[in-house]
Every structure is written in C-alpha cells, then in structure tokens.
C-alpha cells in the first residue's frame, strides 16, 4: 500500500510541477504579447474614466 502511495505522490508532484510551469508560461506569453498592449492599456485607464 505504501509503495502505491509513494508512486502516486511522485507522479503527482512531477506532473503537477510540469503543469504549473506550463500554465505560468502560457499566462506570461499572454500578458507580454505586444498585440494585447492596447487592450491592457484601456483596461488600466478604465477606473479613471468618467462617464
């Protein structure tokens, strides 16, 4: 039983780390994409906009 738990824990730690690093890279590419610059600038000014 302990062997199964250790194998499962090792698998989850390894692939969980890979998953979170991949998600971090996806978010980083999305946030730093130059095509999104105008969209982010508009969102940043939104609280200051008076209607």
Image (cartoon, rainbow, N blue to C red):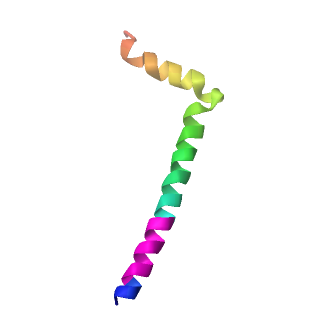
- Which residue is situated farthest in the left direction here? 2
Left or right: where 48 falls relative to 33: left
Name the one closer to the observer, 2 or 45.
2
On-image quarter of the N terminus: bottom left
Provide residue 21's location: percent of width, then percent of height: 52, 52
> Measuring 65% from the left and 28% from the top, which residue is drawn there?
35
Magenta stretch encompasses residue 12: yes
Q: Main secondary structure of the magenta part?
A: helix
Magenta stretch in the rendered image: 5-14
Count how many numbered circles sit on residues in the image: 0
Provide residue 32's location: percent of width, then percent of height: 59, 32
Provide residue 6's location: percent of width, then percent of height: 39, 80
- Which residue is situated farthest in the top direction here? 50
Name the one closer to the observer, 23 or 14.
14
Magenta stretch encompasses residue 30: no
> Measuring 40% from the left and 74% from the top, which residue is drawn there?
9
**Vertical side of 37 occupied by 12: above or below:** below
């Amino acid at each position: 039983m302990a062997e199964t738990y250790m194998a499962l824990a090792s698998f989850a730690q390894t692939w969980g780390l890979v998953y979170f690093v991949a998600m971090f890279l996806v978010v980083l590419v999305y946030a730093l994409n130059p095509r999104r610059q105008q969209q982010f600038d508009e969102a940043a000014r939104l609280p200051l906009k008076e209607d």
